[in-house]
Image (tube, coloured by chain):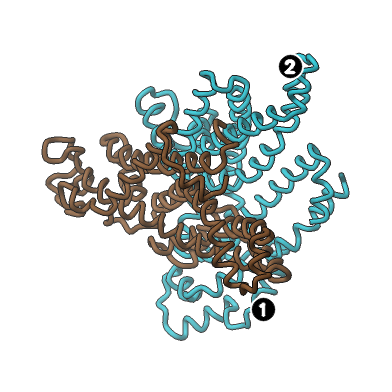
């Protein structure tokens, strides 16, 4: 098991290198000249001399591979450059905003798991009866609901009408309820549907029928024969939802005036602040990769068959 | 049951979700095509004397902060909202088919290389990658469409590759190879038609998801430029009026919600038809 984890950690390095190369090359293949964006954002008139000077200070006059290598060298030393807008180191700015986003994303993940598992179990246990219909209806609405619209609905209901929750900002637990719900509903619904399907499939296997024929109490049939096989797709799906949850947090933050990295990133996108977007993309991708690694380790722990496949792949 | 025979079955009313899904999607397509004729007012006509009117006989759903008729904007907005998703889907399918088809059919080193490229694209969180491409290309609807397509295609390439590989090994494809059919002919006449059905079903199930992404970026102000009517932008425009004129915000969202639901209904129903073992799951 330890060998598996170490191997997977080692594999992160080439993937991260590839991702950084992809990001770097795409940014520099773009149709615009970063030097022009830099001048525009610093309010310097773009004369030929100014462009040439900025190209030199930003290192844009060097060959691409040299730029990449020096950028990589700095990045390894946690220096991702200076934001064109704020003039501060990019990484400091992003790390200042990131914890608030992670708080939302992490809680949304917890909420996804805590709600989807009971709902999926409920629906599968009473398949075709009213709990099943109720869960299917709720989850069907959940997968069709735009998260940003849901956020406004929640504000209208809980802040405007009932006056229970604060509509904006970060503070106590009350501030967390609506954003977390808005982010989590989609993943929660998908997971609940998936768990239900997976439980029904596992429950239809012949060894389950045999277990029932042997007269095992229903409790043991579920615990030992159905649940153990039905968890696995849920683990995989959860890994795939983490990326969606991060994206959801970025959008939802802007609505609740949550001081996270989302609004910072949107303004960087609008202003074409390349160093910020480069670091932002790498940071969140790295984060997702680490989350996926954890998910894979959980999977390997739950399903010994996958350990060998993971190593050989 | 093969895809073709499943799709050729008579539409049974026993499964109402398929009929409802088809009807709703049909309605949306009609609105997208003929919305400009149906709309009671010019959707872009600014009339500041009529701003933020409550619903009345002339403006059935009231007007927005620039005095534009909300109902007309909702109807006309269908074209941009639906059209942008369809374009995104077409791009994603084209890229996915090209890359996945080549990877699956040629195999070997090409396959390995293309799949590593897919892996690379799939390591990014989708929205983060879309942000990144919008930074690169600039804001605007066409760029958002490209950005979303570029952040989704790898999943389709993967899927297409898997489908192609299973079909490639089937006896009838091998038989046509023995009969002397060229690689291209085998791909075009045997492999592609057999994967078209499953691919279309998967795409239908994904349209709703893609619609949420496109409208989400529009909502953030990265997509459609403000004067045009598009549901995501309309929600963004109405943000300040949630306290006073909530219908300005609720109704465009409702349109997105219903559209996504229509496509999800259709997609789920098509999947159940295709794979009867999944029925009633």
Residue A108 visible from this viewpoint:
no
Q: Does dot 2 land on a helix, a strand or a loop?
A: helix
Which chain has been coloured cyan in this picture?
A
Where does the image place residue B263, in percent across and percent down from the top left? Answer: 42, 44
Tags 2 and 1 in contact by the CB under 8 Å rule? no
Where does the image place residue A193, in percent across and percent down from the top left? Answer: 57, 33
Where does the image place residue B236, in percent across and percent down from the top left? Answer: 35, 47
| Marks 2 and 1, how far apart at CA | 62 Å
- Chain B palette colour: brown
* Residue B171, quarter of the rendered image: bottom right
Mark 2 or 1, nearer chain start: 1
Please tell me which residue is depicted at 66% across the width and 56% down the height of the picture: B166
In the rendered view, does A37 fall on the left or right side of B167? left
Check the residue under mark 1 and report the chain it is in.
A
> Quarter of the image containing the C terminus of chain A?
bottom right
- For disc 2, the marked residue is A219
Label 1 Cα neighbours within 10 Å, binned few <14 / some 14-19 / many ≥20: few
> Quarter of the image containing the N terminus of chain A?
top right
Closer to us: A144 or A71: A144
Please tell me which residue is depicted at 79% across the width and 37% down the height of the picture: A302
Above-or-below relation of A144 to B109: above
For residue A65, which numbered disc appears in the image? 1
Check the residue under mark 2 and report the chain it is in.
A
Residue A188 visible from this viewpoint:
yes
Closer to us: B237 or A306: A306
Please tell me which residue is depicted at 35% across the width and 38% down the height of the picture: B254
Q: Does dot 1 land on a helix, a strand or a loop?
A: helix
């Amino acid at each position: 098991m330890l060998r598996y984890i170490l191997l997977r950690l080692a594999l992160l390095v080439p993937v991260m290198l590839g991702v950084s190369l992809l990001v770097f090359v795409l940014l520099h293949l773009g149709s615009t000249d970063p030097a022009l964006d830099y001048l525009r954002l610093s309010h310097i008139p773009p004369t030929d001399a100014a462009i040439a000077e900025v190209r030199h200070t930003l290192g844009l006059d060097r060959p691409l591979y040299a730029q990449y290598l020096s950028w990589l060298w700095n990045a390894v030393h946690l220096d991702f450059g200076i934001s064109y807008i704020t003039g501060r180191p990019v990484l400091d700015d992003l790390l200042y905003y990131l914890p608030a986003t992670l708080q939302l994303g992490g809680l949304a993940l917890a909420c996804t798991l805590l709600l989807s598992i009971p709902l999926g179990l409920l629906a599968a246990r009473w398949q075709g009866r009213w709990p099943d219909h109720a869960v299917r209806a709720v989850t069907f609405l959940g997968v069709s609901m735009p998260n940003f619209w849901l956020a406004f609905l929640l504000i209208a209901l809980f802040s405007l009408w009932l006056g229970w929750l604060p509509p904006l900002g970060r503070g106590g637990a009350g501030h967390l309820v609506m954003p977390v719900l808005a982010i989590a509903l989609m993943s929660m619904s998908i997971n609940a549907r998936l768990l239900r399907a997976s439980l029904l499939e596992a429950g239809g296997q012949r060894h389950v029928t045999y277990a029932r024929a042997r007269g095992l109490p229903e409790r043991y049939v579920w615990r030992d024969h159905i649940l153990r096989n039905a968890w696995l797709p849920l683990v995989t799906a959860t890994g795939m939802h983490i990326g969606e949850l991060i994206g959801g947090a970025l959008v939802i933050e802007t609505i609740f005036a949550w001081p996270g990295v989302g609004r910072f990133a949107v303004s960087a996108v609008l202003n074409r602040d390349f160093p910020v977007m480069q670091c932002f993309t790498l940071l969140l991708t790295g984060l997702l990769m680490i989350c996926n690694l954890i998910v894979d380790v959980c999977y390997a722990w739950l399903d010994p068959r996958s350990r060998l496949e993971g190593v050989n792949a | 049951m093969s895809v073709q025979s499943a799709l050729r079955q008579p539409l049974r009313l026993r499964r109402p979700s398929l009929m409802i899904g088809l009807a709703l999607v049909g309605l949306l397509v009609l609105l997208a095509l003929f919305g400009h004729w149906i709309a009671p007012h010019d959707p872009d006509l600014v009339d500041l004397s009529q701003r933020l009117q409550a619903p009345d006989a002339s403006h059935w759903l009231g007007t927005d902060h620039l005095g534009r008729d909300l109902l007309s904007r909702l109807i006309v907005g269908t074209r941009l909202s639906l059209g942008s998703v369809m374009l995104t889907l077409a791009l994603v399918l084209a890229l996915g088919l090209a890359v996945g088809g080549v990877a699956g059919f040629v195999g070997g080193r090409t396959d390995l290389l293309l799949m590593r490229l897919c892996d690379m694209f799939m390591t990014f969180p989708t929205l983060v990658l879309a942000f990144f491409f919008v930074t690169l290309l600039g804001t605007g609807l066409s760029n958002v469409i490209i950005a979303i397509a570029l952040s989704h295609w790898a999943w389709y390439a993967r899927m297409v590759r898997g489908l192609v590989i299973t079909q490639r090994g089937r006896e009838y494809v091998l038989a046509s190879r023995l009969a002397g059919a060229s690689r291209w002919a085998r791909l075009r006449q045997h492999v592609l038609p057999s994967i078209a059905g499953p691919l279309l079903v998967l795409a239908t199930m994904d349209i709703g998801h893609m619609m949420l992404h496109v409208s989400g970026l529009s909502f953030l102000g990265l997509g459609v430029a403000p004067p045009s009517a598009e549901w995501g932008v309309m929600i963004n425009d109405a943000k300040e009026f949630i306290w006073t004129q909530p219908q300005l915000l609720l109704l465009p969202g409702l349109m997105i919600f219903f559209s996504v639901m229509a496509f999800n209904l259709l997609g789920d129903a098509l999947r159940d038809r295709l794979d009867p073992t999944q029925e009633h799951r």
